[in-house]
Image (cartoon, rainbow, N blue to C red):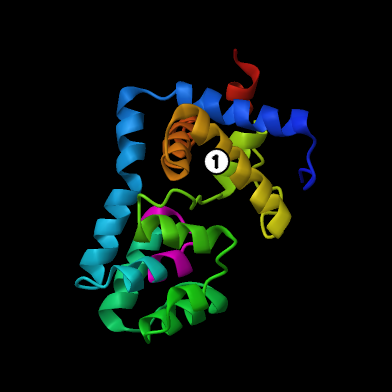
Amino acid sequence: MIQIKADTATREQYVTNIVKVWKAATAEQVTEGRLWYVTAHNLADMMTEGDVRKGAGVLAALSPQTSWPLNVELAKTACETGEPSGHLGDALAKAAKILAGVDPTEVLPMDRKTGHFYRCILDPQDADAICIDRHAHDIAVGEEYGAKDRGLGAKGRYALIAHCYREAAQRLGELPSVVQAVTWVVWREGLVGRSTRGTEFAKSG
């Protein structure tokens, strides 16, 4: 795991890595990334017939350790039936509370991934929210960690990577969530079909 108290040079390298992946994006990848949270917002609205806060909360609660398609499937089923299923107990309990009317900010860890994911879906124009998942971590560090523990449950480590994305976003003149979404698309598509997952972006240029 990376050090929580990274020195200035290390932080700068993380920002550089993020910007490098952004610059590797095709026009199609940039478009997909820009629309990612807007699409998720619309989905949250549709699932709950206009209660975007609830829909975003359920999506976020059921997001840990799931692919996006599965996340959507579980959230849709939960909203339709009123009974979350198909996930771990903690995630299901959070989703159930949100469905019962509890404000997501009282249920989700707002200084971690699921809390920020909720904020990004709720308001795609949120200028501070930034969802740091495993891909976002690996982009910043410049290394594909695979199954290794990234330690993002630690508040300080999450905050470090989030800070680097905000700095990269400022340099690029973009929202942090847009930078995260676009680079996520690039990184994920770069991993598909590769038998050896490596540090191609960190090593290039």
Q: Is residue 148 left or right of residue 193?
A: right
Residue 78 appears at what percent x and percent y? 34, 76
Q: Residue furthest top?
A: 205
Q: Residue at x 52, y 62 (%)?
A: 114
Please tell me whether residue 147 is drawn above or below residue 75 in the rendered image.
above
Can residue 195 be seen in this snapshot?
Answer: no
Quadrant location, the C terminus:
top right
In front: 192, or 159? Answer: 159
Instruction: Write the start and end of the magenta stretch as one range.
Output: 58-69
61 falls in the magenta region: yes
Please tell me whether residue 6 is drawn above or below residue 54 in the rendered image.
above
Amino acid type, callout 1? Arg
Dot 1 corresponds to which residue? 166
Q: Is residue 83 left or right of residue 199?
A: left
Residue 158 appears at what percent x and percent y? 65, 52
Secondary structure beneath dot 1 equals helix
In front: 43, or 86? Answer: 43
Residue 147 appears at what percent x and percent y? 66, 48
Can residue 26 be seen in this snapshot?
Answer: yes
Mark 1 Cα shell of 10 Å, populated few (<14), some (14-19), many (≥20): many
